């Protein structure tokens, strides 16, 4: 159990409480914004920087890779060195990397800056929530986290819309520059109101076992090697570099498992968690479903602009109903899952979402938003709404309370890894490479093929849920 250093028990009605909430919400909003809005910008930045499909893939995946690999380490660093300190470091790091993204003069520069941006996000993302958990009075903690979750979700919904407007009115570069004033607001609010806190049990031992650098680096190497092989294979085939990357990635997976098993409870990811079959199945389900989500959003944004002929603003508007459905429907889906168990929502949800993708495969040039796009997006959003809250609740319920933090962090990493692998693999599977995204015929064929693959992933997830997922039973002091 964490022992947190003394910190003011903030109240949500106090100035310090509101300021702390503001800092956490703005910081999370930056990360969520840059997870969604970049897809809308891909056609414009691809044309301006003369990027290939691989360049666009790395623009998305460089960010996701760092978030997935280092988010658990970021949380552990905050526990050891101070949650506010690491949170602020992440905010400044993220802002500087965002400026570098906006100044990019080539795809290599942009991809490198996106890797740096993801690393900053891995520091501030766990920090924004842990600061709330550690700082607020127990009676106000639930309200504070609920407010953070709701308003961060609003930023996710508005992100593609605001980003689309910035792209059309100014330039794709402004989707990155807009983070600078947001970061300044976060730093000022955090310095003024956010109290410092840390895990005193870790601090007293000097941090021994507090964080697992080897595990984080091996996780990054595994994801990076496999991603590199998938992205470069269309252009280079079975070249030595591609094969070497695949071998390194797979070897890093094996080494990661061995290192984590040897470290036991001191590991970034205690392997004892996987003694719970439900926890294992739920995380496989997470990878499958979020792979479908990541692949769908990557292809839709490029297709609507380069084939259908929509503006960046209208493209950003296209997915807003999906996020609004999540905001409104997730609490109800969570309550339903609590009453009847997760199996039915996690089975029906992916089927409904797959039906939405099959509808969206029919979208073509001159499509109407209301008639051709909205029904499919709404179905996909409704299906996802049935999944998200029950999945999160079930993951936490599948392990003992003392493992809730690492279980939640790993599930978050699994969702990002799913999107990462989908963006890497789908262009290979549908034969899109080079500058094919600029050719309407090639992109249209790839889009329809990609959405079919995504629908199949969702149906596979539904089958997994129907057969292997049951109501989680919370057990005592060990992974259940």
Image (tube, helix red, strand yellow):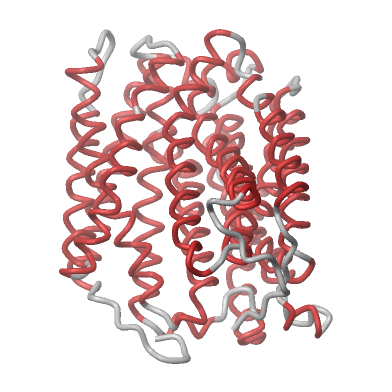
- The answer to which image quadrant residue 45 occupies is top right
In the displayed structure, would residue 55 be above or below residue 335? above
**Front in this rendered view, residue 322 or 225:** 322
Residue that appears at 18% across and 49% down:
351
**Front in this rendered view, residue 244 or 372:** 372
**Front in this rendered view, residue 86 or 416:** 86
Spot the residue most to the right.
Answer: 206
In the displayed structure, would residue 168 be above or below residue 162? above
- Work out which quarter of the rendered image holds the N terminus and state it: bottom right
Left or right position of 266 against 307: right
- Work out which quarter of the rendered image holds the C terminus and state it: bottom left
In the displayed structure, would residue 223 be above or below residue 230? below
Residue that appears at 77% across and 29% down:
100
Residue 187 in percent (x, y) is at 75, 42
Residue 57 in percent (x, y) is at 55, 35
Spot the residue most to the front.
Answer: 14
The answer to whether one can see residue 247 in this image is no
Residue that appears at 73% across and 57% down:
84
**Front in this rendered view, residue 106 or 177:** 177
The answer to whether one can see residue 18 in this image is yes
Left or right position of 475 against 45: left
Residue 475 in percent (x, y) is at 37, 88
- Number of marks drawn: 0
Residue 6 in percent (x, y) is at 72, 73
Left or right position of 437 against 348: right
Left or right position of 231 against 457: right
Residue that appears at 44% across and 83% down:
400
């Amino acid at each position: 159990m964490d022992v947190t250093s003394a910190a003011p028990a903030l109240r949500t009605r106090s100035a310090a409480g509101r300021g702390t909430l503001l800092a956490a919400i703005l910081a999370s909003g930056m990360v969520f914004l840059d997870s969604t809005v970049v897809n809308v910008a891909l056609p414009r930045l691809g044309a301006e920087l003369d990027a290939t499909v691989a360049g666009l893939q790395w623009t998305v995946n460089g960010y996701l890779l760092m978030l997935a690999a280092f988010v658990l380490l970021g949380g552990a660093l905050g526990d050891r060195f101070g949650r506010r300190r690491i949170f602020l470091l992440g905010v400044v790091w993220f802002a500087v990397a965002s400026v570098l993204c906006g100044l990019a003069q080539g795809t290599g520069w942009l991809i490198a800056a996106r890797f740096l941006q993801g690393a900053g996000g891995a520091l501030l993302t766990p920090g924004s929530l842990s600061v709330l958990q550690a700082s607020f009075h127990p009676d106000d903690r639930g309200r504070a986290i609920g407010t953070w979750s709701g308003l961060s979700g609003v930023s996710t919904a508005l992100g593609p819309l605001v980003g689309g407007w910035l792209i059309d009115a100014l330039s794709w570069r402004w989707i990155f520059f807009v983070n600078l004033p947001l970061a300044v607001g976060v730093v000022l609010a955090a310095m003024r109101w956010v109290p410092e806190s840390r895990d005193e049990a870790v601090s007293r031992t000097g941090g021994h076992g507090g964080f697992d650098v080897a595990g984080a680096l091996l996780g990054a190497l595994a994801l990076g090697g496999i991603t590199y092989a998938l992205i470069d294979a269309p252009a280079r085939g079975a070249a030595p570099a591609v094969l070497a990357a695949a071998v390194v990635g797979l070897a890093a997976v094996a080494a990661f498992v061995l290192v984590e098993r040897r470290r036991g409870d001191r590991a970034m990811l205690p392997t004892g968690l996987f003694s719970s079959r439900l926890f294992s199945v739920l995380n496989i389900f997470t990878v499958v479903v979020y792979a479908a989500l990541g692949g769908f959003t990557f292809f839709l944004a490029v297709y609507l602009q380069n084939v259908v002929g929509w503006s960046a603003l209208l493209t950003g508007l296209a997915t807003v109903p999906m996020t609004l459905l999540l905001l409104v429907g997730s609490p109800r889906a969570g309550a339903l899952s609590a009453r009847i168990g997760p199996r039915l929502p996690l089975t029906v949800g992916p089927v409904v979402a797959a039906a939405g993708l099959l509808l969206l495969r029919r979208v073509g040039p001159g499509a109407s938003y209301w008639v051709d796009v909205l029904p499919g997006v709404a179905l996909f959003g409704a299906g996802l709404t049935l999944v998200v809250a029950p999945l999160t609740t079930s993951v936490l319920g599948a392990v003992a309370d003392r493992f809730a933090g690492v279980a939640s962090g790993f599930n978050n990493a699994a969702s990002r890894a799913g999107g990462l692998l989908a963006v890497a693999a789908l262009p290979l599977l549908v034969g899109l490479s080079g500058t094919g995204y600029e050719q309407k015929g090639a992109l249209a064929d790839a889009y329809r093929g990609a959405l079919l693959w995504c629908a199949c992933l969702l149906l596979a997830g539904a089958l997994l849920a129907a057969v292997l997922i049951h109501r989680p039973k919370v057990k005592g002091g060990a992974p259940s």
